[in-house]
Amino acid sequence: MIKISPSILAADFSRLRQQVELVETAGADMLHIDVMDGLFAPNLTLGPALVECIRKYSNLEFDCHLMVENPDNFINMFVKAGADIITVHYEAAKHLQRTLNYIRSCNLKAAVALNPSTPIEGLKYVLDDLDMILIMTVNPGYSCQRFIPAMLDKVRELKKMLGSRKIDIQVDGGINLENLYAITEAGANVVVAGNAIYMSEFPDKTIQTFRETAYDAEA
């Protein structure tokens, strides 16, 4: 069964506590927290103070996606703020294996993200240090972008590379009910969705429909 991770970036920030509680009550598995520094990604978004603020109101697994230059400079901040997973970008980490190993040493799950144009080949040297791999299905920076169809082949290639390894494959960007089946059939099992959930009239029904629509490899 897939894991659903609503992106808090699409929430109503004037009611942030309620928006976090909304998706948790609706049955979300995780909360995706986009962190952008205006350098690696052309936008400024969320920081550790916000994570610390909402942490006390939720039992969801917090996945902090660091779209930042020099991610090593930010890890301790998000560890202290209450992250459960820290995702760093392959393109931004100078010594990726060391960074992933350090995240795990903090008793957190370690993940790496790949931009659309970044090939997966370099990951084969760090698979033993990973709990999750995030395939960006849009270019980082903004919400409401369209899913890039070529990423389906990338997910398939990654699934083949992983073989029997128990590493989650996450996708983020432009995910909706129209493309969900194809994405999950390709091999993704963790789905980030922002507007598709937060902009829906009934988020609980939307999350349930996501589960029913997704490809089930065990069926």
Image: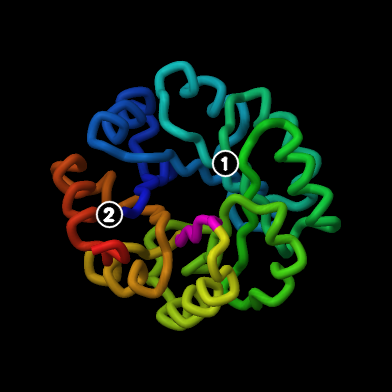
Image height check: is 192 above or below 14? below
Residue 65 rendering spot, x and y as whole percentages: 58, 47
Q: From the viewer's perspective, is the residue at label 2 or at label 1 nearer?
A: 1
Residue 20 rendering spot, x and y as whole percentages: 36, 30
Any mark on residue 76, and which?
none
The C terminus - image quarter: bottom left
Residue 177 rendering spot, x and y as whole percentages: 23, 64
> Left or right: where does residue 205 sit relative to residue 107?
left
For the residue pair 68 and 95, the one nearer the viewer reads as 95
> Left or right: where does residue 119 sit relative to residue 59?
right
Circle 1: element type: strand
> Left or right: where does residue 175 sit relative to residue 94?
left
For the residue pair 77 and 171, the one nearer the viewer reads as 171
For the residue pair 50 and 94, the one nearer the viewer reads as 94
Q: Which residue is mark 2?
A: 196
Residue pushed farthest top? Answer: 56
- Dividing the picture into quadrants, the one containing residue 17 is top left
Q: Which residue is mark 1?
A: 64
Residue at horizontal 70%, vertical 68%?
Answer: 123
Residue at horizontal 61%, vertical 78%?
Answer: 117
- Dividing the picture into quadrants, the one containing residue 148 is bottom left
Residue at horizontal 23%, vertical 70%?
Answer: 178
Question: How many numbered markers are drawn?
Answer: 2
> Left or right: where does residue 144 sit relative to residue 212?
right
Work out how far the residue at label 2 is from the one at label 1, CA to CA, in angstroms: 20 Å
Task: Answer few, some or many: residues within 10 Å of disc 2's Cα (few below 14, many 20 plus, some between 14 and 19).
Answer: many
Image height check: is 138 above or below 11? below
Residue type at tag 2: Ala
Task: Answer few, some or many: residues within 10 Å of disc 1's Cα (few below 14, many 20 plus, some between 14 and 19).
Answer: many
Residue at horizontal 23%, vertical 53%?
Answer: 211
Q: Which residues are magenta?
A: 166-171
Callout 2–callout 1 Cβ contact below 8 Å: no
